[in-house]
Image (tube, rainbow, N blue to C red):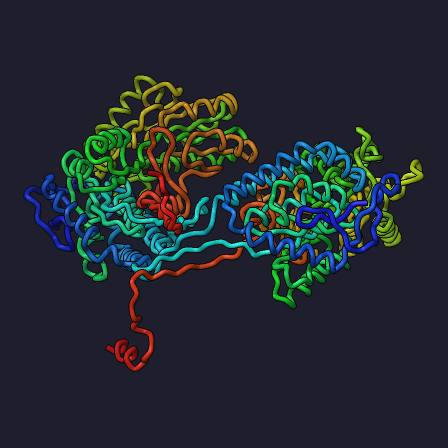
Amino acid sequence: MKTYQNFINNQWCKASETREIINPATGEVLAQVPESNSNEVENAITAARQAFDTGPWRQRTAQQRGRILFAMAELVRQHAGRLAELETLNCGKPIVESEFDMADTATCLEYYGGLATKIHGETLPVPDNALNFTLKEPVGVAALIVPWNYPLMLAIWKLGPALAAGCTVVIKPAEQTPLTVLEFARLVSQSIPELPPGVVNVVTGDGLTAGHALVQSMQVDKVSFTGSTETGREILRGVASSNLKKVSLELGGKSPNIFFADADLEAATDGALFGIFINQGEVCSAGSRVLIQKDIYKQFVEVLKAKARRIRLGNPLERDTKMGPLVSQEHLEKVEHYIELGRQEARLLWGGGRPSEPHLRKGYYVEPTLFETDNTTRIAREEIFGPIVACISFQDEADALRIANDTPYGLAAAVWSRDIYRCLRVVKQLRAGIVWVNTMQPCYVESPWGGYKQSGHGRELSSHGVEEFLETKQVHINLSETPIGWY
Amino acid sequence: MKEHWISGKWCRVGRESIPVINPATERTIDNVARGSAEEVDLAVQSARNAFKKWQWIPGVEKAAMLHTVARNLRDRKKELATLMTLEGGKPFCENRDEVDWTAACFDYYAEIGRHSRGTSIPPVFPHQVNFTIKEPYGVVAAIVPWNYPLLLLSWKVAPALAAGNTVIVKPSEETPLAALELAEVFAELPEGAVNIVTGFGEEAGEALVRHPGTDLVAFTGSVETGKQVGQICAAQVKKAHLELGGNDPFIVCSDADLEIASRAACWAAFLNAGQVCTGAKRFYVFEDIAEEFTNRVVEFTRSLNLGNGLEPDTDIGPLINLRQLDHVHERVQQAVVQGARVLCGGRRPPKFSKGYFYEPTVMVDVKQQMPLVRTETFGPILPIMVVRNIDEAIEQANDSTYGLGASIYTNNMEWALKAMERITAGTFWINDPLTDNEAGPFGGMRQTGHSRELGEEGLDEFRETKHVHLDYKQEIKPYWYPYSKYNKLSSE
C-alpha cells in the first residue's frame, strides 16, 4: 500500500497522524496519507509565506511563470493515463470521465500559462500634472481548498490562475480524495526544477482541522474554496474573525434544467439525464431540478424512465460503465437519507434503491433516481449531490421562471426550446452564473464559472479566474514640484 | 450669406459663394462661402494653435465641455431639425431623431474619452515597468456627407476632441447650414478646437486632405472619392479613416413573420429616400414566401406618403439633388431594359411640379449582374431577388465589393448565426435593421473602408499608442558592446 506525506518547501514531510484512503467501488484501503494537524498546516503556510516574501518567486517574470505552467500541462498529458486511473480508484467516477478530466486539467494549465503575460493594468487620465497607472500584483499566499468530485481538475482551476498571478499556494485536497493532487506534486517536484521551494505546497487532512487552520491563519492572504454552501458560510466567519483575507467561493447549486414543450424530445431527455447523472450527480452544476412543461410532462417522464434504465452502473475502471459509486460511505448515507425523505414527501418515479448485483454490493452505489414533486419539498430545495432528480411540471414561461429562480442557489441553469427568442428571454431573467441553451454541462476554461446568490463569490476560469488572485495597485506620480501650501 | 467659422470667428477671404437649395422646392435658402486653399490654410493654422493647448486639457474638463455641446444640441433641436429638413429634404422627425443621436454621441465620448489612457503590461524583467499611453494625432480633417450632416459629423468630431485632437469640419456643399449652426453649439470650446470650412470637395476638401498641417483625415462618402482621399494621404503617410459606400443585403427567410419583415424591408430601403450608407439595397427572399412577401411590400409601399419633409404626414422626402434623381432613374430604367419589372414606383411623381421626388420603387425579376444590384444606387429602390435557401442567400449577399452592413429576418438561430459568421459585413442585424448603438462599432469591410466609428474602437481611431519602457535598475546590460564579452558569457 502506498504511503504519502505532505509536500512542503519541495520536500516530503511526515505528519504525526495518518488517514486511510478508501476505494469507494470496493471499500478497500488504497493508500495512507497525513491527517495534518494545525501545526503541520502552519508549516506549509510559513513555507508559502517565505517563498512569497523573500524567495526568488517574486522575481520570476510573467513569461517564466507561464513556462512553468506549460511544463505542468505537459506533465499531466504525459501521465494522463495513470492519473486518470488513480482518480477513478480514489473517487469512483467512470474512467472515461477521469480521462476527460485529465485532458481538461492540462488545457487549464496551458491556458493560464498563456494568460500570465496578458495580465494588464491600465494607465489612467487624471485631472492633474501626474502619471497615474495601475499595477496588477499577486494577492500573496493563497490557500486552495478543493472538493472531492473533480479532485485534480478543480485543484488546477485554482492553481493555474494563482501561479499565473504570481501567488504562492497551499493546496488542501478533500480528505477523501487527495491522491491525484499528491501525485501531481510528486511529478512537479521531480520534473520542474525551475519551481522554487515553497511556491506550491500540499497538505492533506480534513476541513475541521486542516481547512480551519488555513482559514484562520494570519499568514494567508486569500482563500479559494470549492465545496458546500454550509462550509462556505463557515469560511466567511473564519475569515471575518481572523485577518479578513480575500475569499472566493464556488458553492452548491440546485440548478434548474428547463424543458419547453417544443424542445426536441430525444435531445432534451438525453440532456436531462446527462445534466443530473454525470459523475453520479456529484457535480456542483448538476441539473437536479428538471422543469418540464405540462403539455409534454407525461411523455417526457416516460422517456426519462426508459433511458434511465439503460444507465450502466459498474466497476468505474471498466470503459462501458456509465455510473460509478458515490465517493464515501458517509456520503452514501446522506444521499439515502434524501431518498427516504423523497419517498415521504414526493412520488418516486424510478430507482430509489441500491443495485442488487453481487459485485456492486461492497461499493457505495445508488441507483439513478427520479422523483415527481413540486418546488416546495426538501428534495427540490436542498442540494443532495447525488444521482437524485426532482421532476417538476410547469404551465408556461412565467411559471417556469418563477420556479427556476425560487431557490437560494444561483450557480447554473439550462433552457431547452426550439424558439431561440424565448430562450434568450428566459436567459436574461434567470438568476444564475452559467446558463446553457439546448445543452447542459459543457464547461470551457475560456469562459467564467461561478454562481449568483448563495452559490458563491467570484468566478473561476477565464480571465475572471486570475482576477481573484490579483490585487490592484494604483500608482500616482506627481509631476508638479510646486508646494501645496496648505498650512 | 454664411461665412467660414475659424478660430471662433466668422470669416472669408474669397468672394465666391455656393447656393444651398431646398430639394423639396428647388428654391435657394441661403448661400455659403466657397472655401479655397487659402481659407483652409487659415483653418489649419487655427486648429494647430488650438491643439497646443487642447491636448493637455484634463479629460474631466474636456468631458464637461462635450456634455455642454450635447446639451446645446438638445436645446436647439427644433431649429436644427427644421434647417436640416430645409437643406437636405429628410422628414422632420428623422432629423429630430438625428439631433438626439448626435447629442448622445457627444455624451458618450465625453465619458469614455476621460475613462482610459492605455494599459500597463507585464515587464520582461522584474526591475522594469511597462505601460502604454494613448495620444492624439493632432489636427483632424473631418469631411462629412449630406445624408446625415450632424450625426456623421459627431461620429468624427466627438471622439477626435475627446482623444485630444482639434478638428476642421468640411460639411457637404449640399447641407452646410446645420453644420454652421453648430458654431454656437461649440461656443464653449476653446477657440480653434473646432473650425468649419464650407466648399466643394475638389476644392476645400482636397486642400484639407493635401495640407501638411492635417494629421488625419476622417472621411465619409463614396468609394470613388474615398480612393482619391486615400491616395493623397498615402503619398504623405497620413492616416486616412475612410467610411465609404455600402450595398447592404437583406435576407428574408421562409420562417420570418412576413408582416414584420415586409414593414422592416420598406423602412430599411426607403429611409431618407434610400440615401443611407447602411440602407438595405438588395433583398434576397426565400422562394416559398417570395410572392407573399412581395405582395405585402408592394401594398405597403403604395401607402407611403411622398412630400415635403416639413409636413407631419410625410414618410419620404425628395432626393438631395437633380443629379442624384437622374442617376436613380437611369439605374431603374436600365434594369427594366435588362428584364426587371417595376411593381410600383419607378418614376417622378406627377403630382409635384417642383422638387427632386422619386416614388418608392419595388422591383422583381432583378438579376445579380445588373448595375442596380452591383453598385450603390442610393435611392428609394427595393429590388427583390429569389433564393432557394440560406446558403444561396449567403453566397449572393457576399457577391459584392462592399461590406458595410447586412440584415436577416428569421426565427431560425442556426440560419441567423450561419449568415452572421459568413457574410462579410461590419454590422450584422438580426430582426431589426439599421439600428445604431453609440457603444457598438460601425464601419465596413472590403471597399467600404477599414476603420470603425463609435464604440471604443471609434475613440482609438483618433489615438496613437505609445509604449513606455522604464528600467529602474540602471545597469550596463550584458548584451551591449563589446560582443567579445557577450559571446564569452553566452558560451559559458
A184 on left or right of B320: left
Image coords of residue A454 (percent x, y): 33, 29
| In this view, A464 is above or below A262 | below
| In this view, B326 is above or below B318 | below
* Residue A121 visible in the displayed image: no
A171 on left or right of B145: left
Image coords of residue B201 (percent x, y): 76, 56
Q: Nearer the viewer, residue A387 or B237?
A: B237
How many marks can you see?
Answer: 0
Q: Residue furthest bottom?
A: B484
Q: Residue at x 16, y 33 (%)?
A: A208
Image coords of residue B483 (percent x, y): 32, 80
| In this view, B370 is above or below B485 | above
Q: Residue at x 31, y 32 (%)?
A: A252
Q: Quadrant of the C terminus of chain A?
A: top left
Q: Residue furthest left?
A: A16
Q: Residue at x 30, y 32 (%)?
A: A385
B302 on left or right of A48: right
Q: Nearer the viewer, residue B49 or A277?
A: B49
Q: Nearer the viewer, residue B444 or A50?
A: A50
A352 on left or right of A258: left
Image coords of residue B112 (percent x, y): 52, 43
Q: Quadrant of residue B215?
A: bottom right
* Residue A413 visible in the displayed image: yes
Q: Nearer the viewer, residue A361 or B75?
A: B75
Q: Quadrant of residue B76?
A: top right
